[in-house]
Amino acid sequence: MERIREHILETARAEAEAAVKAARKEAEARTAAARDRITRESEQRLARDLAAVERDHRQALDQRAFENRLDLLKRKSAILDEVFARAAERFIETPRYRDWLTRRVASVADLEGEVRCNVRDRAVCRAALDRLAGQGAVNLTMAKEAADITGGLIVRTERFDLDITLGAALKDLRGRVTPDLVALAFAGLDEGGRRDQ
């Protein structure tokens, strides 16, 4: 009976050791698989996070570069605004401006309506209208109130207003000469606004 008991104990112990060994092996395999899966998932998450950080960084740099270019364009535009404003101020003070204004009045002599100009230009416009009236029938009259314009005139007819202002002429001129002016004035300037060395 003692042999049977020992045999049973030995068999139970061997089966228990085999079961524990199998359980350990299975647990180690599950742990290794879980470690591999967690490592892969961590690497994938890290790669996604790194790609997102790089994308955000690139977008932030692109946004900043765009803002810098936009700021530079605004500064250049402000410089051009100033150049054209000064040119208009100087032009208004010359006899050529009065000639230009007289020609503008003569160019609308065939219209019927009212001539509007600023206070400073009323005498020139009035003289041009009087001269035209002396040459024949003119259906233009001077407006009683002055127009709020830098120079030139506006002809108001029944159907439309014709803008022959200095502002409109300078806008047209600016549209035609800006590319050449920009190339000349800003040539050799880097993004920081300094001339290349």
Image (spheres, rainbow, N blue to C red):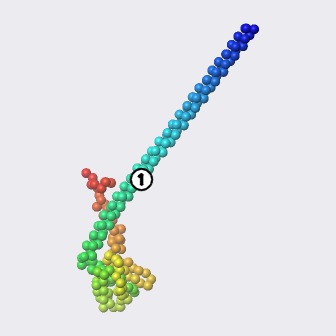
Residue at figure coordinates x 33%, y 83% from the top left: 105
Q: Residues within 10 Å of mark 1 (few under 14, many from 20)?
A: few
**Residue 113 position by quadrant:** bottom left
The spot of residue 7 in percent (x, y) is 71, 11
Q: Looking at the rendering, which quadrant does residue 174 occupy? A: bottom left
Q: Quadrant of residue 107?
A: bottom left
- Vertical placement of 107 versus 39: above or below? below
Question: What residue would you read off at disc 1?
Answer: 63
Q: Looking at the rendering, in which quadrant would you find the N terminus? A: top right
From the viewer's perspective, tell me whether residue 62 is left or right of residue 31.
Answer: left
* Horizontal relation, residue 147 to residue 30: left or right: left
Residue 84 is situated, as x and y percent measured from the top left of the image, at 30, 69
- Residue placed most toward the observer, 43 or 24: 24
Res 50 seen here: yes
**Element on which disc 1 rests:** helix
The amino acid at mark 1 is Gln
Q: Which residue is rendered at x = 32% and y = 80% of the image?
A: 118
- Residue 197, compared with residue 46, is above or below; it is below
Which residue sits at x=30%, y=56%?
193
Q: Farthest residue toward the top? A: 2
Residue shown at 64% from the left, 21% from the top: 20
Q: Where is residue 25 in the image (x, y as percent from the top left)?
A: 61, 23
Residue at the right extreme, as displayed: 1
